[in-house]
Image (cartoon, rainbow, N blue to C red):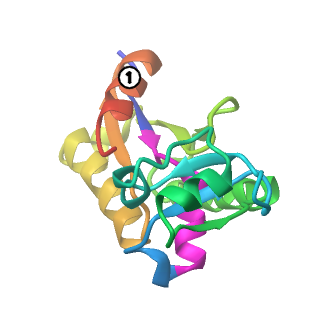
Amino acid sequence: MDRLACVDLPSLALQLLVRANSDWRDHPVAVVLEDRPQGRILQVNEHARTHRVLPGMKYASGLSLAPGLRAGVIEEVAISEAVSSLVTMLRDFSPNVEPCKDEDGVLWIDARGLNRLWSSLSVWGAAVADKLRDEGWRASVVVGFSRFSTYAIARTRLR
């Protein structure tokens, strides 16, 4: 039976924003659609959630709940470049890496035949996760038999 892995980088745009502004890590942070008071909040980190700032709110509303809220816009081109970079990095682990067309930050890796190169696919999956973490990404990696099950499990981990 074929094996594959689902790699999930939750809130990819938010991760990109924090990577670009490393001094924001310990502050409430939001990705906004537009950098203006009425711009809609798309993603927030846990610090913002503790202040009850949620996706869908206006940036001004978020600021009223968390006066220290940092926010920024992440352009689609930046997300595309990050996904392309991730695909290139993950090809060190398998020649077949496919980004999900419908969801940024989800990638599929073909794991067929890799048990001949690695002691187990669990060890291989852990190496993939370690590489992502070493590169500064928050991600979950789940190895399994179907896209649906690996995706479902990956989405419930590392939120």
Give 150 or 145, whichever is nearer the viewer.
Answer: 150
Q: Is residue 95 magenta?
A: no
Residue at numbered disc 1: 152
The answer to whether residue 123 is above or below residue 86 is: above
Image location (x, y in percent) of residue 89: 54, 62
Image location (x, y in percent) of residue 75: 79, 58
Q: How many marks?
A: 1
Question: In the rendered view of the protein, which quadrant contains the C terminus?
Answer: top left
Image location (x, y in percent) of residue 147: 46, 20
Image location (x, y in percent) of residue 142: 32, 36
**Which of the 4 image quadrants contains residue 77?**
bottom right
Q: Going 39% across and 57% down the picture, which residue do you hit?
A: 138
Give 88 or 156, whichever is nearer the viewer.
Answer: 156
The answer to whether residue 67 is above or below residue 104 is: below
Residue type for callout 1: Ala
Q: Which residues are magenta?
A: 7-21
